[in-house]
Image (cartoon, rainbow, N blue to C red):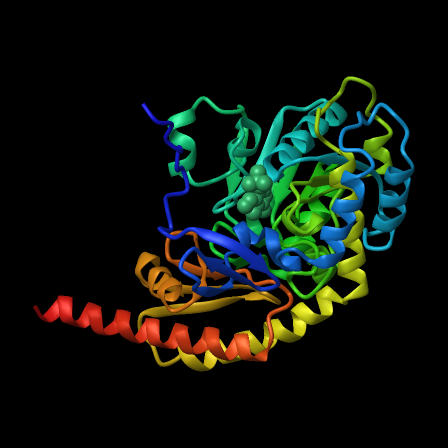
Amino acid sequence: MPLKYLSLYGSRGIKIVKGEGQYVWDSNGNKYLDCHTCHGVAFLGHRHPKIVNAIKEQLDNMISLSTAFESFLRDEVLTALERIVPRRYNYVYFLNSGSECVDFALKVARKVRKKVKFISFTNAFHGRTFGALSVTWNPKYREPFKPLVPEVEFLKYNDVNSLDKAVSEDVAAVIVEPIQGEGGINPATQEFMKTLREVTQERGVILIVDEIQTGCGRTGYTWASDMYGVYGDIMLVGKAIAGGFPVSIAFLTDDIGSQLGEGDHGSTFGGNPLALAAVKAGVDVITGEDVPGRARVMGSKLMSKLSSIVKDFKIVRELRGSGLMIGVELRFEPKPVIECLQAGGVLALKAGTTVVRFLPPYLINDDDVENLSSVMSRCLNEETTRRLNVKTS
Ligand SMILES: Cc1ncc(COP(=O)(O)O)c(C=O)c1O
């Protein structure tokens, strides 16, 4: 029997054969504006030359090295990261995926706090390994795999009133996305983030800010934490940071990092030389090309263009987001609109149950914005007509 791929994301039905900048091409030569970007990974563009060159150079030098050995490259990466990471974080740990990084943060919180309980929020998404899934809200993802990590309580996202009572001294950590990505592009309110920080600080509870999707400039700020002026005790970064290379990073305050030692965690591939070279180049791109600034400008252009379009459609409930992290909430499951966008040369992805999510590379230009908006307008039109026809037939 031939081997079959276990397609757990479902299939988009096209074979993508090439990517460059903000575009990808399929096997029939069709070009797409990529606002899927591998779940937000290719935010720095496909095959950014700085990242490609850094990885190529490192390939010629060394691929594998345990982090038990000292490394000049690692020293350089730490220096590079100092340029973009909020000053309150003093320790850095490299891993390979977002979920793995979330698991690490939960372990760290348990060890440091000597408490068991975690708090997460409705519609939160933190990944699919056992730890990460345990603080992920969607019952569809959780139910088949129970029992998960015990003592996780989900509070209502943005409900300021629930925080005081629930975030007691018995809690090891609270984990939060400043803007929920997979859960529907739901931004936290300023008051919610501020109160969450105050309450956790007061009770000595660790605040884990998951910037795996919001980080690296996508929201128009280097970190969404900058937008709120609210910082965690642990910040998690992944997806875009290494320009497409699989890397995640946990940043820890001095107080937390200094309590960890040999044997508390490990990862065979975490912090490998290729990953480090890619991170260093990624930081160069983020700072050298003012990625957050560009995301802010292009994001506001895309947002205002989309808002002028969606206001005419009753099938659209709301437009939300920040920078180049944008969601169009429909009144129904978004699959037909996402399929129509794909047929029109724009790749988008679903968020929550009803949201069309756009996570374009920071390289998106004025023509791309025009193109995306006109395809979206056409697709919303077609879907409106289709729904009317279904109703009347
Ligand atoms: C906010 C957030 N945290 C964690 C994850 C999990 O990352 P990964 O799929 O790399 O394990 C994701 C992935 O979408 C995410 O958006």
The relative height of residue 104 versus residue 181 in the rendered view (above or below) is: above
Q: Quadrant of residue 257?
A: top right
For ligand 1, which image quadrant applies?
top right
Residue at the image position 76 percent from the left and 29 percent from the top: 64
Q: Residue furthest top?
A: 263
Q: Is residue 375 above or below residue 215?
A: below
Residue 338 lies, with reference to residue 106, above or below; the image says below
Q: Position of residue 375 (x, y in %)?
A: 40, 74
Expressed as whole percent of the image width and height from the top left, the position of residue 116 reads: 63, 24
Is residue 218 visible in the rendered image? The answer is yes
Residue at 64% from the left image edge and 62% from the top image edge: 219
> Of residues 187 and 349, which is closer to you in this image?
349
Q: Quadrant of residue 253?
A: top right
- The foreground one among 166 and 6 is 6
Residue 159 placement, left or right of 29: right
In this picture, residue 242 sits left or right of residue 158: right
389 lies left or right of 384: left
Name the residue: 73% across, 23% down: 266
